[in-house]
Amino acid sequence: MAILNKIDLLYSDRCFLEFITTIKNRLKSWEYIQDIQMVVLKHKTENVNHNLDFSNYYSLNIRNGLEKKYISSFQQFIGAFIESIIYQVKIRGDFVRISKLDVLKKALAFNGKTKKDVSLILKDRSFYIPSNVKK
């Protein structure tokens, strides 16, 4: 058990497995790999609820990215990812029109990777897995 902002947080295997099942049902080609993963989605803007769009996503295997030195640390990568989003919003004018892939490319560039490096990294399906890749 952990406490965050005076709220008890409990871990439950059952809740975790339900969460994985729910996500797997929404992300048709995604598979839980029992490792550190990051799934990047966009939000739908055509309705007032601003739901997430599960039809076009990518996932990243963070441990592979660390082992292969694509990213230097998870904390630095998340910081670079957020900075990349801010940069994309500035150049495109709003949050709706940003490209998830451009955000990732810029975040990798913030981590010291060249365009050639990024191009090779995006071909590595053990790290970068787009939604259109079949299992």
Image: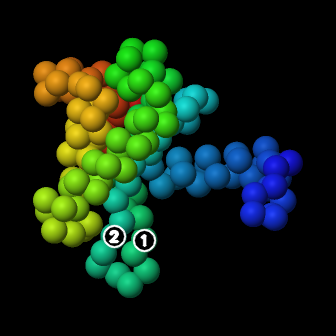
Residue visible at 21% across and 69% down in the picture? 94
Q: Can residue 123 be seen in this view?
A: no
Residue type at the position of mark 1: Asn
Q: Can residue 35 be seen in this view?
A: yes
Question: Crowdedness of circle 2 by 10 Å Cα count: few (<14), some, many (20+)?
Answer: some
Q: Quadrant of residue 129?
A: top left
Residue visible at 49% across and 37% down in the picture? 75
Disc 2, SS: loop
Q: Which of marks 2 and 1 is nearer the N terminus?
A: 2
Tell me if residue 78 comes above or below residue 9 in the rendering.
above
* Residue labelled with disc 2: 44
Q: Name the foreground residue: 100 vs 54.
A: 100
Question: Are the residues tagged 2 and 1 within 8 Å (C-beta)?
Answer: yes
Q: Residue 51 carries which label?
A: 1
Disc 1, SS: loop
Residue visible at 53% across and 47% down in the picture? 24
Q: Where is residue 58 in the image (x, y as percent from the top left)?
A: 35, 43
